[in-house]
Image (tube, rainbow, N blue to C red):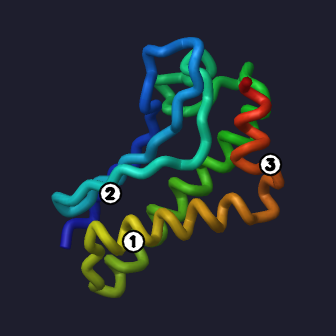
Amino acid sequence: MKSKITIRLYLQYPNIQKKLSPILISVSWSGERVFKSTGVSVFPGDWDKRKADIKNSADNAQAISMYLSNIQKSVSEFHFDNLRNSVYVSKIDMRKQIDLIIQNAKNSGGSKTSFFDYYDMYI
């Protein structure tokens, strides 16, 4: 099994400046690829395309950045734990795990801000 995994964050609608755009995660491994929404939306002007992260000047940037980093870290750990145990990860397995990671990240003590709280902040 190949050990490489690529995790990228990007906006669904990067060119519509006056509208919130969902932040998507793309995970690629062993010739497979999965796309999912992170459950967070930002204005494209608050997104740093080069860093694939929210700009420091955006409202609640630190909490959103930490939320996104935790998702990326958890996806990577899931991949390498399965690789270490010689377990094949299918697209379905990865989608389910990402859903679980996002749900846990929303419910964790790291940030008590809900998706709707983020949404209200940016409207």
Q: Determine whether, in the image, residue 40 is placed left or right of residue 3.
A: right
| Residue that appears at 37% across and 47% down | 26
What's the residue type where badge 3 is placed? Thr
Q: Any mark on residue 80, and which?
A: 1
| Residue that appears at 21% across and 59% down | 32
Which of 99/49 is in front? 99
Residue density around tag 1, few if under 14, some if 14–19, many if 20 or more, within 10 Å: some
Q: Determine whether, in the image, residue 85 is placed left or right of residue 108.
A: left
What residue did someone put label 2 on? 5
Work out which quarter of the rendered image holds the C terminus and state it.
Answer: top right
Q: Any mark on residue 113, and which?
A: 3
What's the residue type where badge 1 is placed? Phe
Q: Could you give the CA–CA distance between mark 2 and mark 1, rounded to whole angstroms?
A: 9 Å
| Residue that appears at 45% across and 62% down | 76
SS state under label 1: helix
99 over 62 or under it: above or below: below
